Image: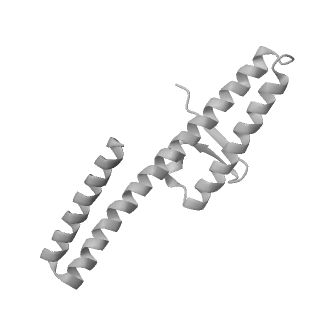
Amino acid sequence: MFDPFYESEYLGRVLYLEDLKDLNRSDYLLLESELNLAIDKMKKTKQVDWDAADTDLLSKINLKLRVCEKFLKRISQVREHDLLRIDEYHLVFLRQRLANHLGPMAADKMMNEARQDAFRQLNKESNS
């Protein structure tokens, strides 16, 4: 089975999809920028050289394009997962602070009311 990899000039290393989870936030941004530039360049090359290019070159470009797009998709998934985790931690810390200032019962009541407000807002948005 083909295990896609990307040789990043910006990061100075070869990356496999499973390596993405170990990158820090700044490396994600650098890699994402590099991948977007590479994709744009390959698409332009395909447009310019489509008639003159041989099928072998086009196949190589298409393969590289799919690998880059796969890496971008994975970066997006990791980022989305991180944002969900931030939201989870945010709610935990918010509840702790509310409990410290107002007491646990009042904190739970406020959290439940805010959750109900969020559900109402989602329903309103889905009905419009």
Q: Residue at x 43, y 56 (%)?
A: 83
Residue at 82% across / 16% down in the picture? 54
Residue 57 image position (x, y, % from top left)? 78, 21
In this picture, residue 48 sits left or right of residue 90: right
Relative side of 120 to 106, left or right: right
Residue 25 is situated, as x and y percent measured from the top left of the image, at: 55, 60
Q: Which of the image's four quarters has the C terminus?
A: top left
* Viewer-nearest residue: 52 or 113: 113
State the residue in front, 29 or 15: 29
Farthest-out residue, bottom: 101
Task: Residue 36: give x, y in percent of width and height.
Answer: 68, 43
Q: Quadrant of residue 3?
A: top right
Query: Which coloring applies here?
Result: one colour
Q: Residue at x 58, y 34 (%)?
A: 4
Query: In this image, 38 relative to 122: left or right?
Result: right
User: Hey, which quadrant is residue 65 in on the image?
Assistant: top right
Vertical side of 115 occupied by 35: above or below: above
Which residue ends up furthest to the right in the rendered image?
52
User: How many circles with numbers are drawn on the protein?
Assistant: 0
Q: At 25% across and 64% down in the image, what residue appears?
A: 114
- Residue 115's place in the image compared with 32, above or below, is below
Q: Residue furthest front?
A: 128
Which residue is situated farthest in the left direction here? 105
